[in-house]
Amino acid sequence: MTEAQKDTIYIDVDDEITAIIDKVQTSDRKIVALVLPKRATVLQSIVNMKLLKKSAQKSKKNLVLITSEAGLMPLAGAVGLHVAKNLQSKPAIPEGPDTADIPESLVHEEELEGEDEPNIDKDASIGELAGVAAVAAAMPEAEETIDLDNADETVETSKKAAKKPKDKKDKKLKVPDFNKFRTWLIIGGVLLVLIMVAGFFGIRVLPKAKIVITTDSTDTEMTVDFTANTSTTTFDEAGKVVPAKLETSKKTDTQTAPATGEKNMGNKASGNVSMSVKQCSSISTPSAVPSGTGVSANGQTYITQSTVSFVFDSISGGCINFKSDGTTVIAQNPGTVYNIGSNAFTVAGRSDVTAKGSAAGGTDDIVKVVSQADVDAAKAKLPTAANADAAKKEMTASLEKSKLLVIGSSLTTDGPNVTTTPNVGDKADNVTVTATTTYTLLGVNQDDLKKIITAQANIQIDKTTQTVQDDGLGSASFTVDGKENPKVKVTTTVTIGPNLDTEAIKKEISGKKKAETIQIIESRPSIKEVTVSYSPFWVVKTPTNSKKVTITFEKAKN
């Protein structure tokens, strides 16, 4: 006989419904007998029974529960599962519970599901259903006797004939997705941490208070001289030497302009000129005309190439005539305009000399060259003012980053140093002008300068009842003499007011509401008005951190 078509599966008392379903679905037999332990709590749920039945239907298994538990019988009957007391007993669907105690929807579901059950002979045992009754009779006590052989063809035929529409209600029977639950749990934890961090910043870090105290004060103008030493970091209060820093910024700009000049690059005309002198008041020989002297004709100038000396020629009309050998002349510039025939010439600086000659060989070749006007046009495009502003802004930011007080009047400019490419007179289509300018700005240690001003002010006040409330450096004027370690004169208006301990005030108003803060401060003498503002908008109390509280003093308006 061939191998039986039944599978026997033993269920542990700790098995979950998902594990049982997995065992049923992975079985390769058509008939599956589930041997249940006593007190199988996992199947004492109508939902689990339905899940088990549904999984058997989907995997085309005929399922039989092997159990004698009285509590499971009504549940098995309610979903239409076959039950047998042991492996040799005949399977049967137990009677279901009283439908009066079950919701109408469940009763309807069980009736529909029952339609899928194959026609099983309730009078046959499990072994007989598998087609091996003879083997089962011969071996009544052995579990292996219920192994079956091709016994469920009839069952398959009946199941095909009894197919019914898929029950949509089974979609509601889902196993909980614990991964999704864990994801939401993580998200909730992250949100909680973010809320806690935001709360900390909102309560401890962000709150600030700005307090303006108006007092009975007087203004005193003071002038203080000090040395801004750029080569030391040591403050000398007695010698009034304040550490300083000289910030430097170099700006280089390039501008281009088209070349508009013209130049004749042709040949220069050359010729020969002879000179003579007529003297009527002297008998001495005229002085020679040196080489390089300019001679002119028709508005054009030529340059002599050798020295012209005079010798006696004749006497006529009571005057002595002197003559000279001819000298070569070359036109001052190229061009055909310098080509002239025999013509009279004038000699520069020698009105007594008469000259005559001619010149030829000049040619024209006009090319574009750089003119001085082109260079000036390029210079005009340089952003000189914009560069100065940009340099001052950069140097100011650098000095303030070093916590230094910027002395704006100390700004100096070196340049611009301008170079042109090509040079004026050179053949070119464009000219490029490059200008480099160096700017310097002075910054001093503000705290040290305050000490010098305060020390000088304290000489003029009663320190037991008065104090310097404002050194006036924010609007002070400076005069700088020199560049390296310059002498600086600062003129400032110092505000003298009542001697108030700001740290003691901060400690007393710590954690107080606005109205109480104002009342505490106004209780002090010489105080006219107190203005308190908090930020951000949700802050309603003075921060307990004194570093978050800023107190400034103002003079009462007359």
Image (cartoon, rainbow, N blue to C red):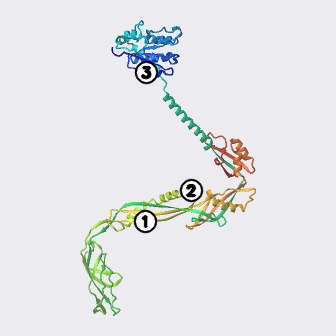
Within-10-Å neighbours for mark 3: few <14, some 14–19, many 20+: some
Q: Amino acid at mark 2?
A: Glu
Position of the N terminus by quadrant: top left
- Disc 1 designates what residue? 418
- Disc 2 designates what residue? 400
Q: Is residue 169 visible?
A: no
First of labels 1, 3 by sequence position: 3
Residue at mark 3 to residue at mark 2: CA–CA distance: 78 Å
First of labels 1, 2 by sequence position: 2
Seen from the viewer's position, the closer of residues 59 and 554 is: 59
Dot 3 and dot 2 residues touching (CB under 8 Å): no
Q: Amino acid at mark 3?
A: Lys
Q: Position of residue 182 (x, y in %)?
A: 51, 30
Q: Amino acid at mark 1?
A: Val
Q: Residue at 69% across / 61% down in the picture?
A: 455
Q: What label does residue 23 carry, if any? A: 3
Q: Is residue 424 above or below residue 21?
A: below
Q: Is residue 294 above or below residue 392?
A: below
Seen from the viewer's position, the closer of residues 82 and 364 is: 82
